[in-house]
Image (tube, rainbow, N blue to C red):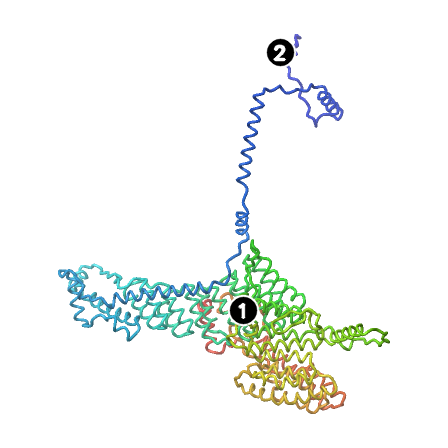
Amino acid sequence: MLKLTKRRAHSATQLRKPPPQYGALEQSYYAQKLRSANDKEKAAISPFSAPAPRSVLEELEDRVLALKESALLAVSQEDASYSEEELMAVYEDLLALPATESPDTQAQAQAVSEAEAQFISIVNAAASRLLQVDVSNTPEDSSHSMTNRLRQLRGAASQERPVPPQSLSSGPIHLALIARLEEMIVTLKSIQASVSPTNATENMLAAGETIVQPVVPTGVMTENEWSALVQYSVHTGDVLAAERVLDLTKQCGSAISEDMLNEVLAHHAAAADVDRTEHFVHKYLAESQTSRQRDLHIKAHVNATPSMEFPERALQLLHDYEVRGTPAPQRTYSRLITHLFSTRNATSHAHAWDLFSHMRYVAHPIPDAVMYTTMIRACASPALSYRGEPERALDLFTEMTVDRKIPATVGAYTAVILACARSGKKSFVQEAFRLAKEMLDSHRDARGASPFTPNRKLYCALLEGAKRLGDLSRVRWILAEMVKQSSSDDETATINEEMAVNEEVMLHVFHAYAAYKPPFKRSETRILDEQPKPVQDTNSAEKQSTSSQTSDSTIQGGPTQDQSVVENENNSFAQLPPQTHADVIREAKSLLAQILEDQNAPETDSSSGIAFQHVKLTSKLVNSYLSVHYAHSPVQVWRDLFQTLHRDLGVPRNAWSYADVLERCAHTKKGAERDMALHLAEEVWTEWEVVENAWRARQDNPVTQTVSARLIERVYAAMIRMLSVTGRLDAAVAHAKAFAYRYPPPVICEPPPKHPLRSTRMTLIAAKPIVRLTNASDVPDDAVPPLLSFSEVEVLHHRLVAANRVQDLKYLTWMCKAYENALRTRRERTLKATPAENSPDAQKQLKDNNPIRSAHT
């Protein structure tokens, strides 16, 4: 707007700016409402703009473009589609199974044979070259001074000719080749010493020049030939010849490869020759050792240690390498831990766990699958806990598979299943079967194949859990599966030895039969009064008599003819588990008869598919079969079997045979059965005294090897109970006094000396495990001599109280308190014990293996 007033004439030509518009949010509510109404009105009255008409050519062009686009889309869809074979290939790649943990034995054997053929051919070629060539007949330039000098020195040094091939028949070829090489090296050394002029050397020394004589390889043999000669010598068992080859290689100026050293060191370690191993290490590996060489060095000491002894020297060497800052590889720790677990000693088992934690702190923080499997398997051992440690096994398995992402192996699954099964608790046994199902079903490939196949160890682990619960149905099913999988499907019907039933499997099966409780009890059966029979015809009477016979046989436990059975060669078992004690005994007898039949079957009869031909009759197997009769047969039956079965089968008794029968005799019922059991117990006790005296005299035989302090306690407790319940109190008190005389309480007070490696003193660097998983109070003392507690003589105590025998009661009370106090004193001394540092070896070990102490001194 233009304003032409006088006061603002100077700005008449300027355009005034309109006021700024308010935003939608800055306006009032009324303004916003009015604005929205105006917008709606404008939209309602605005005319509709119709599209402009198109020509026919434009519509035709649009249709052509649409057809082209649809054709391209169809082609792209055809390219994106896959065939069934391609989809299956992709699916197989996604679900591909990892490589099997057990390598192919045939491929390994073939590779070893090829390697042997290769180094044998190399040695033969070198022998034909060095033992048949005549240097004097070789055409050379006569004007060459070195050649003439070599011929003169060779003629002066030795007049011997090269060994012809026909003379090698008197000795091995590698010895002839080594002798030839030694001769050539002596000759070359003499030539090298005589070729350098003395005068020139003196002139150079006078001028102040330094004379350097480089070691130049002579080129007598190549590196492959030296290595092949070492392998050939080790292959023939001549390790001294192999060390001679190493010396010759060094004298010739050739480099000694690591494989050559490892070949000789591996032979010493496998032979458990500690002296030769130490000599070899100090001679050839004094400066440094590789990881493989440290492993072989310690392996020699481990192999030299008996399986039941503590590997003290090997552990000291292991910790010595740790102090030097060069720890051994993980396979060395695994080998030592396995050796510690193989000993029947709780201290060794505890030290194995301590070594495992020490390894993770010092050398290898992340264990491999082999180490995890070894430690999980140790959780099933009753050395530290009677029922094992299933919680620790599950924790280690979870740490391995979930935390560390290490694929589970058959050995790991079998180990954790065994640890859960041996606990005996229903929840853990069910977890064991769940893990078995997960192992076989959760890792299948695209075609449904599982990478894990059940083996005998897995079935034995499952049998461990089933027998502890008395689950006979599962035991029978597992046995049927093993028999089915061990037999091949071809016409020969051969037996797979890896899956065949052996004595361990049948041991678990008989134990399951012994722990099984039949559901039918004759004492709980109600007998109904007989009702008057109505008049009926002859046919109906026959049918009723037949049905009554069938029902009677069912009540007595015998199988009916109409009952479905599972056929197994000559024997048949009912599909349902045994319903009575008689059924249990019948099936156990049938199994033993089948074992004996397969044992006596001819070896050439392979078409019959013998299922139990790999079962060996041992004392444990016979004891397990007798345990079935102890649980389900009357006294006269198992008494006769105990007296005759071992003799008829030709299997000797062991210490457990006497303990089992005495404990069964001590728990018989009143009446004639107890009298028969007393006579049998007296006969068994006479035989037992011979075994006990042999054990006390430290005689080494198969029977005394099964005797232990805890077993002696069970035998004495059973015999004392047997005499007490039959009223022979004088004999029972005499047995208690005899036990206290043979194993006096003061002997228990003194614990064994503490090993220096078991010291619990806190140190940062020491030749012992620094981080431990076990305390001194957690390790059970399995070296306690035999003793009797009050619970084991409680029945005798009650009978003496009833008979008012005061003096015998005082003696029995004193004996129990003496053993109790002696055991308490032993425990206190064990917890306060210190390592035996008074011995010279222990003092030397503490001084040499403690670098901090040696630095201060």
Contact check, label 2 and label 1, Cβ < 8 Å: no
> Which amino acid type is marked by label 2?
Ser
Residue located beneath label 2 in the image: 11
Place of residue 670 in the rendered image (x, y in percent of width and height, measured from the top left): 74, 85
Q: Is residue 44 visible?
A: yes
Of the two numbered discs 2 and 1 on the same chain, state the one appearing first in sequence. 2
> Which amino acid type is marked by label 1?
Ala
**Which disc number belongs to residue 151?**
none
Quarter of the image with the C terminus in it: bottom left
Place of residue 474 in the rendered image (x, y in percent of width and height, measured from the top left): 65, 68
**Which disc number belongs to residue 493?**
1
Q: Is residue 469 visible?
A: no
Find residue 303 and report its image quarter: bottom left
Q: Residues within 10 Å of mark 1 (few under 14, many from 20)?
A: some
For this rendering, which residue is in front, 427 or 823?
A: 427
For this rendering, which residue is in front, 766 or 132?
A: 132
Instruction: Determine the secondary structure under disc 2.
Output: helix
For this rendering, which residue is in front, 412 or 569?
A: 569
